Image (tube, rainbow, N blue to C red):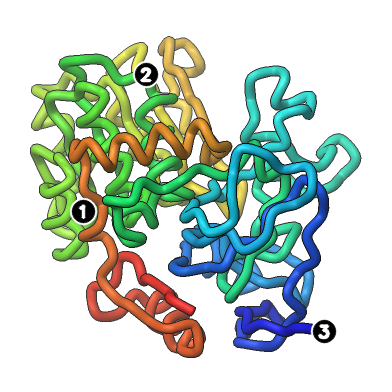
Amino acid sequence: MVMMKAAVFVEPGRIVLDDKPIPDVGPLDALIRITTTTICGTDIHILKGEYPVNRGLTIGHEPVGIIEKLGSAVSGYREGQRVIAGAITPSGHSNACQCGCPSQDGPDTAHGLKLLGGWRFGNTIDGAQAEYLLVPDAMNNLARVPDELTDEEVLMCPDIMSTGFSGAERGDIRIGDTVAVFAQGPIGLCATAGAKLKGATSIIAVDAVPARMVMAKRMGADHVVNFREVDPVEEIMRLTDGRGVDVAIEALGTQATFEAALRVLRPGGTLSSLGVYSSDLRLPLGPFAAGLGDHTIVTSLCPGGKERMRRLLEVVASGRVDLKPLVTHRFTLDRIEEAYDLFGHQRDGVLKVAITP
């Protein structure tokens, strides 16, 4: 049995590097030799025990790699190609896919199984923080990386770029809109970049970490509000002359940021929620206008699939957005535990880490 190194969930508080067998390849699968991957905030939820996964699972859902082996029924690809796969891996033939919502292609939640739809890597199947990754439904999920792009230039595509952009897309931002983005972590920064691409002409970013506030400007924010220095709701209302924003994007997953996003909406505005919440949310009566404010509240799960990945790769290749600066630290796979410690404690201005086996 040929073995590989992988970052494995042992118990809450412990993700360790361990040996696991290299996966067998089924007819519709592809085996990818990972060249670069990263750690996501969701992985930290797993590490802390806030999101349950099975013990022994390989963590990670943001792969860039080389096709090592193709399943017997896979066509349109060849071994040796450099590819990415989205964090969400829809099959293409499920009820959710056929209804136009492929990100929700997952277990039957009506029977009490896991939520979060098509998120399988590092959730229900082994993930990308390893030397090799088995990609299911390869023909629906693999996107070839253009030769002129580096791994780090495309590393954000599988998850945070797709997720952040979806916050702007689901918010239905229009040319000339005013948009507030609450939290400028990696996903919030991508939401800021997505809002600019969608045509927002006034983007207000909310955070308090100096490095993230600087990066928000680089991603397209016109104003940056430090919530430790001012009340962000009052400041946003001042910046909009009391009008409020057309779209508020919540990218952290807390009651406080969700409620603040609701409070700054204009009548008929849209709250686009990207945060992963760990407790019940409450809708305050006033900001919700007792349900009579014509508000729209939308959520989204990171869109996946090869066409989504192709489009994101085209955006990167066009030069319209540069997310490579989000990679602030680099580790080899054998230092994955050190990388988790840094990222989990948000030290040294970390945004994203690049992990190379």
User: Based on the displayed image, in which of its 4 quarters is residue 112 positioned?
Assistant: top right
The residue pinned by badge 1 equals: 227
Q: Secondary structure at mark 2?
A: loop
Q: What x and y, as percent, mark residue 189?
A: 28, 48
Of the residues tagged 1 and 2, which is closer to the observer?
2
Of the residues tagged 3 and 2, which is closer to the observer?
3
Identity, as a three-letter code, of the amino acid under mark 3: Met
Q: What x and y, as percent, mark residue 73?
A: 78, 42
Compared to residue 104, the image places residue 51 above or below, namely below
The residue pinned by badge 3 equals: 1
Residue drawn at the location 57% of the way across and 44% of the way down = 142
Identity, as a three-letter code, of the amino acid under mark 2: Asp
**Closer-to-camera residue (79/332):** 79
Res. 337 in view? yes
* Mark 3–mark 2 distance (CA, rounded to whole Å): 51 Å
The residue pinned by badge 2 equals: 172
Of callouts 3 and 2, the N-terminal one: 3
Of callouts 3 and 1, the N-terminal one: 3
Residue drawn at the location 64% of the way across and 19% of the way down = 100
**Closer-to-camera residue (177/88):** 88
**Relative to 261, 70 lies left or right:** right
* Mark 3–mark 1 distance (CA, rounded to whole Å): 54 Å
Q: What x and y, as percent, mark residue 283?
A: 51, 33
Q: What x and y, as percent, mark residue 232?
A: 21, 44
Q: Are marks 3 and 1 in contact (CB under 8 Å)?
A: no
